[in-house]
Image: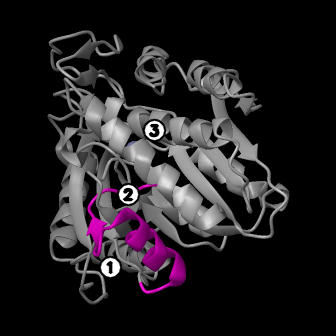
């Protein structure tokens, strides 16, 4: 498994390189146990890899839903090259070791061990490592769109790094770009133009007082909003005709993203009626729904008792979980690695945690499918 994880890290799968090479590494690993994986390629280098261990039994299937892509290494210096996948002091190092190639390696290894042991399964195991979880969820959406080819699932396990906590809820995400429009003019005669940056300031002032109409969630807290990017103006002697701000809302179960958009459109209308020169448009950059799995249902209860963990929790980050929830099965997020290590330089995973994850996943498969 350790070599497999090193090869997966070396098969760099950032937004620039795509997931195709990493999909091949997963497919080759499954082949060692005679499991034929399917690689679904689009746009040259984007890829999902999936596998299905079929059974003749009547039980609903289990889905292990991973992602293949990783974020880039970033600008900060790494002590070791980010895509080396080297082993050091009981750890495997590199981008994706924790988020979430470690989880991929553990899930594939658990499935291989089940297959190699010839245990008779009473339901199918389905494995997916999808493209684009960090960027556009395109891989998960593509997989779920082909749901007619999939079995009925008892549950979905997402091997994201939770440091072995069972996560059943996370907030959603709504990324918006608000563009204010102005009219360019020479800045020695600003009264002949309309300043888009000043207009953006009016939007920012309004946003700082805006509170979406949703009650605080017991596990997830409040819906939050943060203005995280701003870009406008071309030169110091030109009145800017365009300014863009990027706004990140983290939303709660039961909250409709359309309500936020409607509120913001009203704010823009109000600014327009106060100043006829004001003009702004809102575009959705990306949105992911919130996740809330019923933690009192049979699947979560049995998952908890098999893992020997009593409590379920919520996390701050988002996953492709809401997309898989559309398959009509409960979703839990449970995997090796500390979430605070994700997306940072010198990412690593403890080899002992990988082995622990394999053992958890093996036990879960045996519990639900034998
Ligand atoms: Zn992840």
Q: Position of residue 85 (x, y in %)?
A: 35, 15
Q: Using the image, tell me which numbered label, if any, was put on residue 362.
A: none
| Residues in magenta, as a range | 296-319
Q: Quadrant of residue 223?
A: bottom left
**Residue depicted at 62% across the width and 22% down the height:** 20
Colouring scheme applied when the structure was drawn = one colour
- Mark positioned earlier in the residue sequence (3 or 2): 3
Query: Is residue 143 placed above or below 213 in the rendered structure?
Result: above
Task: Give the residue number, with chain letter if any, for mark 1.
Answer: 270
- Residue drawn 66% across the image and 22% down it: 32
Where in the figure is residue 164, as x and y percent of width and height? 30, 55
Please name which of the two marks, 2 or 1, marks the residue nearer to the observer: 2
Residue 287 x %, y %? 47, 59
Residue 214 pos. (x, y %): 31, 87
Mark 2: which secondary structure? loop
Q: Indicate whether residue 344 is drawn in magenta.
A: no
Write down which quadrant ligand 1 falls in.
Answer: top left
Residue 213 seen: yes
Query: Residue 75's quadrant in the figure?
Result: top left
**Residue at image mark 3:** 106
Label 1 CB sits under 8 Å from any ligand 1 atom:
no
Q: How many marks?
A: 3
- Whichever of labels 3 and 1 marks the residue nearer the N terminus, that label is 3
| Secondary structure at numbered mark 3 | helix
Label 2, ligand 1: CB separation under 8 Å: no
Q: Is residue 365 left or right of residue 222?
A: right
Most foreground residue, 54 or 208: 54
Q: Which mark is residue 318?
A: 2
């Amino acid at each position: 498994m350790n070599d497999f994880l090193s090869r997966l890290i070396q098969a760099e799968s950032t937004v620039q390189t795509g997931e195709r090479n990493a999909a091949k590494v997963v497919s080759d690993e499954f082949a060692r146990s005679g499991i034929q994986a399917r690689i679904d390629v689009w746009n040259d280098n984007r890829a999902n890899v999936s596998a299905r261990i079929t059974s003749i039994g009547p039980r609903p299937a289990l889905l292990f839903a991973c992602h293949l892509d990783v974020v880039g290494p970033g600008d900060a210096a790494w002590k070791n090259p980010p895509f080396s996948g080297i082993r050091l002091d009981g750890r495997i190092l590199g981008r994706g070791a924790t988020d979430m190639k470690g989880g991929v390696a553990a899930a594939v290894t658990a499935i291989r061990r089940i297959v190699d042991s010839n245990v008779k399964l009473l339901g199918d195991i389905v494995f997916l490592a999808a493209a684009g979880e960090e960027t556009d969820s395109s891989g998960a959406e593509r997989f779920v769109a082909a749901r007619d080819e999939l079995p009925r699932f008892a549950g979905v396990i997402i091997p994201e790094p939770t440091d072995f906590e069972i996560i059943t809820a996370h907030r959603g995400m709504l990324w918006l770009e608000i563009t204010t429009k102005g009219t360019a003019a020479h800045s020695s005669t600003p009264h002949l133009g309309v300043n888009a940056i000043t207009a953006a300031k009016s939007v920012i002032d309004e946003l700082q007082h805006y509170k979406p109409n949703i009650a605080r969630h017991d596990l997830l807290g409040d819906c939050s909003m943060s203005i995280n990017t701003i870009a406008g103006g071309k030169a110091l002697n030109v009145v800017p005709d365009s300014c863009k701000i990027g706004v990140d809302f983290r939303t709660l179960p039961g909250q409709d993203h359309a309500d936020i958009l409607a509120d913001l459109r009203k704010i823009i209308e109000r600014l327009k009626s106060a100043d006829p020169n004001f003009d702004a448009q809102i575009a959705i950059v990306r949105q992911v729904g919130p996740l809330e799995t019923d933690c009192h249902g049979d699947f979560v209860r049995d998952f908890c008792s098999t893992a020997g963990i009593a409590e379920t929790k919520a996390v701050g980050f988002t996953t492709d979980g809401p997309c898989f929830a559309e398959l009509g099965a409960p979703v839990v997020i449970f995997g090796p690695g500390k979430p605070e290590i994700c997306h940072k330089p010198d990412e690593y995973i403890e080899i002992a945690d990988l082995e622990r994850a394999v053992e958890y996943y093996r036990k879960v498969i045996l519990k639900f499918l034998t």
